[in-house]
Image (spheres, grey):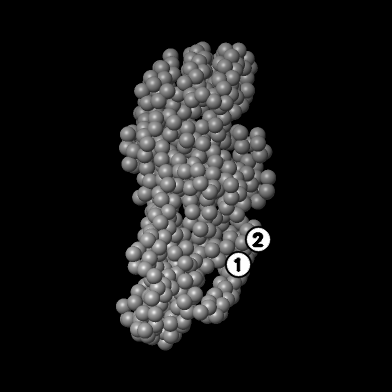
Amino acid sequence: MKRVVLVLSLLVFSSLSRAGDIQQLLQLIDYVGVDYGEAVSGGKVTHPGEFEEMQDFSQGIVRQIADLPEGSTRDKLAGQGARLAERVLAKADPAEIRSLTGEMRKAIIEGYKVTVVPRKTPDLVRGAQLYSERCASCHGATGAGDGPMAAGMQPPPIDFTDRKRYAQRNLYGLYNTITQGVPDTAMTPFHEMSADDRWSLAFYVGQLAISDEQRSGTVANFSDPKLAPLQDIRKLTVLTPAEAEREFGPAGSEMMGYLRANPEALFSNRSPLEFSLHRLDDVVTAYKAGDRDKAYRMAVEAYLEGFELVERGLNAVDSELRLDIEHAMTALRNQIREGVPADQLERSVIEIKGKLDVASQRLSGRSLSGTAAFASAFFILLREGLEALLVVAALAAFLVKTEHKNNMRYLHFGWIGALVVGFLTWWASVSLIEISGASREITEGVAALTATAVLFYVGFWLHDKTNAAQWRQFIEHNVRKALGAGALWGLSGLSFITVYREVFETILFYQALWAQTDEAGRSMALGGFGTAIGVLVVLAWLVMRYSMRLPLRQFFSVTGILMFVLAVIFAGKGVAALQEAGYIPVTPVNFPRFDLLGIYPNLQGLALQLGLLLLALFLWYGLPSRRKPAT
């Protein structure tokens, strides 16, 4: 009964942590898939002790499945688990058991969205060092199970150079064994080891049985398009070499060996969605540990440092899915604030991870089409540039109309300075520092709300000049002297902060777009960028030309209203940015969403925008000075 305690130990551990712990269940399924062949051959029991354990293991699997959350995945697994127990009892062929446990592994990973990939490229040099320090004394210097402490050990240490056993083990199973250990054996859990180190060790152990030819990648033609699906880190970690051979032929097994020995080949261009998946796991872990603040921070990072970086690309191919994921991740943060039960939060995370998987499939080509790249680049700049253009053009027209054309340099100081600082920000973000998602949103939010305050003030000042009495007073004091140096520098500051906010946001969007396009797509993106600049130049000319034809009083009125509208838009966007950074709570309401107008269906943003509208109405019509008759 050398490992009969394993089932009981796993079940006790699961009951102490969470009923039906998925990692423990996966570990148990892998044991049956790999070790069953040592107990049965040709329909006969070859090792009674092993066979008895396989029966215990299969029954343990059935019990753990019953403890999983209700749903179609559990129902499917329950049928598979019952079949597994029945086929083990019937002494079925090991190939059938391996196939069935492989199906169960796949069902668990897909149904419960288990994250089965490392956070970063496994370091095989580090793995070799860890193996020498922690494993070689039992498993031997080469992994053959012949270490100095192996003598008399029951069960004996695993021989990692055994090709037959190698073919039946997947990397995630090795990682799980390193993490959980094997009860009633000398294999203890390595909880104190970081997840990155455990993955490095799993990859190192998982490639000890491959040949030098496989390591070099000279055996198979890896350019064969039929092998493209195997070049996915999620397949590499959950498929066994034998499964890869069945699915992709002998070349699949050869590629599996090469990628195990050279994992960096799959980590050079990973999607930011992988980061989101890992952070969502951190959310659940922190929340179950009772650290709601950390869980909230992790949820914010899952959005800002991962999903937000592919939002624009996803929006180009599936805007509804993009919006659905955004709403789901906002709802997750609200659940953390509300302190919902851990099981409910975990179900929400599973749903979000499922949506992210769909998004990954939508973006699986990794490169946007030329048309999508052009359209994205065009509309990004046009949308962000139009807001800045309206403010700067209105201010420029204002200076001309009030006979301050010679002070236009103040305005130019502002927007040109914003472009220079924006360029330096881009250079620093790619050369010196990494701007975090929270920093991005805080910068955008603070800039937007600051612009809101200034635009609101300028808008009221301009509109106030349309009052008859105020108008005569303004004329009598001579428009040429109405603006002092302080006011001119104030306009310069408004020009700067308005343009810088849009430049900053545009830089971030273009960085994400650039990462999702190939060379041809980048050429199209540059074309979209240039076209947008041309359209903005034409729009600036039209605004300047036709605003100049308005009488001065009407110009003040139109410009004042424009400033108010932009203030309301910036207010909504500023609140939204700070909500995404986690500094303002989000209370969803049933209200239409208009991104272009900065209108989002949440109570906080709408309340601020409504407050601005009510304040504007009061200032325009409610003040006693505004109700006095003209004289």
Q: CA distance from mark 2 to mark 1?
A: 9 Å
Label 2 packing within 10 angstroms: few (<14), some (14-19), many (20+): some
For the residues labelled 2 and 1, say whether their Cβ atoms are less than 8 Å apart. no
Q: Nearer the viewer, residue 443 or 474?
A: 474
Q: Residues within 10 Å of mark 1 (few under 14, many from 20)?
A: many
Horizontally, residue 48 falls left or right of residue 576, namely: right
Query: Which residue is depicted at the point 48% across and 56% down?
Result: 598
Q: Quadrant of the N terminus?
A: top left
> Which is more toward the observer, 147 or 82?
82
Residue 240, position as x, y percentages in the image: 56, 34
Which sits in the foreground, 484 or 290? 484
Q: Is residue 601 above or below residue 187?
A: below
Judge whether residue 214 can be spotted in this image.
no
Secondary structure of the residue carrying numbered label 2: helix
83 relative position to 302: left or right = right
Report the amino acid beneath label 2. Answer: Thr
Kind of element beneath mark 1: helix
Q: Amino acid at mark 1?
A: Gly
Q: Residue at x 39, y 21 (%)?
A: 15
Label 2 sits on residue = 371
Q: Work out whether residue 378 can be spotted.
A: yes
Does 365 sit above or below residue 287? Answer: below
Q: Where is residue 328? Give x, y as percent.
A: 49, 41
Residue 428's label in the rendered image is: none
**Which x, y percent locates residue 350?**
49, 35
> Which of the marked residues, 2 or 1, is nearer the chain's N terminus?
2
Quarter of the image where one finds residue 129 = top left
Q: Position of residue 274 (x, y in %)?
A: 49, 46
- Residue drawn at (55%, 66%) of the image: 382
Residue at horizontal 42 percent and vertical 54 percent from the top? 610
> Circle 1 sits on which residue?
528
